[in-house]
């Protein structure tokens, strides 16, 4: 080890080059071999081969305390064991404690000020005779009650505990009764003595009793009851959420229907110029809410200029509501004048930005259009053999946007239709046993697929059997698992509702 | 017309003509951009290039766009030396050779510095399935028509846009007949719309039918449910 140190420090051995051989033999003869159990470093510390070598013993450290002593300003104080008086005590018992010699000997015992007592209103005999008589309470009882209240500072739990029924013919008073009597008496006294009525504390015994009972029950619930309650509350929340979702879906479907209706009306408008223009004013008058822009819009309609799609669609929506859906659903009772293009189809950002822009910018889809819809649009465009990015003239852009809006509407309608039909199926299957038991004709609820003959007569042209909308890969049943869950959830819901109803009744 | 052009002295920042905008005016400048490509016939030994291509941007009408376009920056693929090509004269064209398709970014800077530059992305097309192109009888042409829409330009810019002189004296033509294409597209779209409208009404009827049925079924169930509550 010492040779290592020397190498590091670069101290050269003075005798080394000359007496190599001699040193070697000298070393061999004189040095003690390191014993086996001792480590090299320890031996290096211990062995005294060469007294000139620098020692490896650590130097002495100054004697320091780990925690230096606190330096106090005043040095050591003297404390004395002395007696003291507690002014809060009623007797003048003397106790002893340690007190600092420097302290003021006349200082009041500091904790005495915390001994607060309640101020009770006590009644005189005459007051009692005049106002405070009660059937259930004798004067002795009332006096005893007030004594206890004074002693125990209106701590009614203690008072109730200390109440001695043996004195008063074994009548056991509940805590509420005691409270009730005390506050009544106290209130009457205050009223007599002219205190404001509003400041008097009124004690409602019934309410207190009920509250106490409820607390007891709450406290004494078993674990199963608690769990059941939590479970029921959660289920209730879920049911409400599902209800809201269903309502939303219904609204969306109704919106789709209006939009589809609008579209039809719009095409009819463009085809039959004069006839519709004449019938329009009468229809508009029939509407419930008249909107200001109506008067201006009629003239636009008669001139039949469909320049801006949003304007014209919003014009059409009021009349179409009356014409296409006579059975207006509850969600549309006040016929609100709102542009329908916002909810269905695509709304293209049309705001004219001052500055330069490319025409093809107009055909960019807004971000709100989801991936699925984009794919559906592309699929359909391929089917119709239209380029994804058509030539960018103004007319073409406009038409292209309208077309895509219609495609999205079609897609949404298809989705709504499939989900509606699916719901129909599930309902049918669920209630099959009931319906067959009642001998109700189930076939009338079959899905519309079987009624294609009827639909063909509705459309003037012969629609090909393969509908273009079937291109859409609208699959709402990816697997049976989610549907099973939904069905089970629906069943659970009805059971729950029954249970809740049963609970409430009982 | 040329005298009106000459009296314009150039851009003066913060002047009335450069800051105020002409209200409710929209000027449309159509243009054509795209690329042509020709196959060498073989793969060139030195760099593996197989095609000679040319990307260009030119106005649709026979006019000189340098009155309102200050410069056009064409960014090629990074493997090309000096990939940022800046051109100031129409047609803004880049002729190069290559072996692969990539996206070209074009930025058009206008004379009015307050106007933001327009960015166009174009995928350079070299390979075609058209048999005539493969036999090298025709060049491959991949052209697009687009329009620059100037909405409410400043007075100064407005003047520049309105006054433009022709580019060439002779015939000015494009590879594709865009008018024809426009008409075809419109026609196709109209047909498509008709089909879709029919479908929509069709679906609508079906949806209504389904909903009515569901309503009916629900009513039946409700009446049954109430009656059969004891049974279940």
Image (spheres, coloured by chain):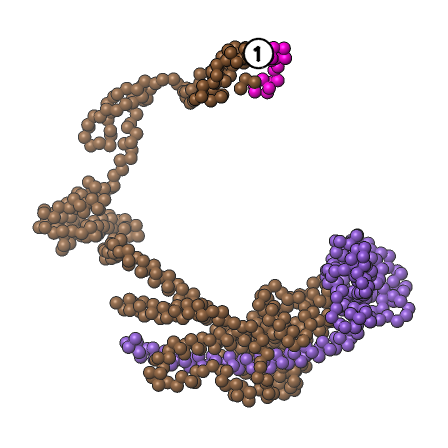
Residue B195 shows in the view: yes
Left or right position of A161 against A490? left
In the drawing, does residue A385 fall left or right of residue A423?
Answer: right
Q: Determine whether, in the image, residue A483 is placed left or right of residue B230.
A: right
Q: Nearer the viewer, residue B44 or A372?
A: B44
Which residue is denoted by mark 1 in the rendering?
A23
In the rendering, at what x and y percent does residue B167 appear? 87, 66
The image quadrant of residue A380 is: bottom right
Up/down of B77 relative to B131, above or below: above
Which hue belongs to chain B?
purple
How many numbered marks, from 0 up?
A: 1
How many C-alpha atoms fall within 10 Å of the one at disc 1: few (<14), some, or many (≥20)?
A: some
Look at 64% across and 86% down and name the residue there. Answer: A272
* Residue A168 drawn above or below residue A315: above
Q: Colour of chain A?
A: brown
Residue A234 image-quadrant placement: bottom left
Query: Which contiguous range is marked in magenta?
Result: A4-22
């Amino acid at each position: 080890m010492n040779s290592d140190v020397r190498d590091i420090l670069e101290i050269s051995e003075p005798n080394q080059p000359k007496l190599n051989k001699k040193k070697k033999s000298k070393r061999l003869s004189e040095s003690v071999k390191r014993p086996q159990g001792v480590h090299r470093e320890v031996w290096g510390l211990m062995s005294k081969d060469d007294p000139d070598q620098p020692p490896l013993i650590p130097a002495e450290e100054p004697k320091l305390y780990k925690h230096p002593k606190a330096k106090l300003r005043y040095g050591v104080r003297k404390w004395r064991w002395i007696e003291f008086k507690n002014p809060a005590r009623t007797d003048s018992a003397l106790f002893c404690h340690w007190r600092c010699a420097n302290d003021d000997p006349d200082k009041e015992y500091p904790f005495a000020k915390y001994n607060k007592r309640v101020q009770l209103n006590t009644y005189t005999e005459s007051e009692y005779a005049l106002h405070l008589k009660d059937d259930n309470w004798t004067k002795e009882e009332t006096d005893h009650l007030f004594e206890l209240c004074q002693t125990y500072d209106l701590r009614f739990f203690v008072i109730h505990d200390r109440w001695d029924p043996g004195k008063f013919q074994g009548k056991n008073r509940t805590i509420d009764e005691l409270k009730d009597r005390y506050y009544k008496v106290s209130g009457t006294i205050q009223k007599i003595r002219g205190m404001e009525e509003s400041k008097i504390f009124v004690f409602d015994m019934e309410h207190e009793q009920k509250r106490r009972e409820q607390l007891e029950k709450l406290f004494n619930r078993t674990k199963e009851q608690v769990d059941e309650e939590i479970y029921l509350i959660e289920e209730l929340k879920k049911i409400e959420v599902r209800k809201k979702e269903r309502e939303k879906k219904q609204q969306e479907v109704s919106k789709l229907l209006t939009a589809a209706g609008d579209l039809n009306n719009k095409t009819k408008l463009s085809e039959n110029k004069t006839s519709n223009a004449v019938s329009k004013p009468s229809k508009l008058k029939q509407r419930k809410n008249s909107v200001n822009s109506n008067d201006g819009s009629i003239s636009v309609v008669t001139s039949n200029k469909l320049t801006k799609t949003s304007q014209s669609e919003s014009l059409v929506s009021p009349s179409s509501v009356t014409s296409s859906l006579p059975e207006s659903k509850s969600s549309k009772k006040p016929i609100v004048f709102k542009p329908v293009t916002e909810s269905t189809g695509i709304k293209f950002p049309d705001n004219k930005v001052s500055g330069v822009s490319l025409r093809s910018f107009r055909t960019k889809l807004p971000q709100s259009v989801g991936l699925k819809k984009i794919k559906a649009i592309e699929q359909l465009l391929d089917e119709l053999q239209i380029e994804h990015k058509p030539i960018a003239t103004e007319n073409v852009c406009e038409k292209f946007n309208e077309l895509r809006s219609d495609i999205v509407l079609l897609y949404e309608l298809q989705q709504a239709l499939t989900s509606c039909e699916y719901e129909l199926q599930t309902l049918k299957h669920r209630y099959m046993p009931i319906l067959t038991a009642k001998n109700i004709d189930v076939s009338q609820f079959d899905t519309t697929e079987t009624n294609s003959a009827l639909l063909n007569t509705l459309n003037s042209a012969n629609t090909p059997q393969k509908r273009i909308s079937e291109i859409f890969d609208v699959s709402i049943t990816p697997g049976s698992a989610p549907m099973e869950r939904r069905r089970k959830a629906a069943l659970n819901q009805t059971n729950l509702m029954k249970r809740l109803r049963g609970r409430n009744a009982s | 017309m040329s005298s009106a052009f000459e009296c314009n002295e150039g851009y003066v920042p913060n002047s009335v003509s450069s800051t105020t905008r002409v209200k409710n005016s929209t000027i449309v400048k159509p243009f054509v951009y795209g690329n042509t490509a020709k196959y060498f016939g073989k793969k060139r030994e030195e760099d593996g290039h197989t095609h000679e291509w040319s990307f260009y941007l030119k106005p649709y009408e026979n006019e000189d766009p340098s009155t309102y376009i200050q410069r056009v920056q064409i960014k090629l693929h990074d493997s090309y030396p000096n990939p940022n090509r800046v051109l100031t004269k129409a047609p803004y064209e880049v002729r190069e050779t290559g072996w692969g398709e990539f996206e070209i970014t074009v930025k058009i800077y206008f004379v009015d510095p307050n106007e933001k530059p327009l960015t166009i992305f174009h995928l350079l097309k070299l390979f075609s399935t058209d048999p005539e192109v493969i036999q090298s009888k025709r060049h491959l042409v991949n052209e697009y028509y687009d329009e620059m829409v100037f909405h409410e330009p400043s007075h100064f810019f407005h003047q520049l846009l309105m006054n433009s002189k022709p580019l060439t004296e002779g015939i000015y033509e494009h590879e594709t007949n865009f008018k024809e294409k426009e008409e075809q597209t419109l026609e196709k779209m109209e047909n498509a719309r008709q089909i879709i409208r029919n479908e929509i009404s069709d679906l609508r009827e079906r949806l209504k039918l389904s909903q009515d049925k569901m309503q009916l079924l629900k009513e039946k169930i409700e009446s049954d449910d109430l009656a059969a509550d004891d049974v279940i």
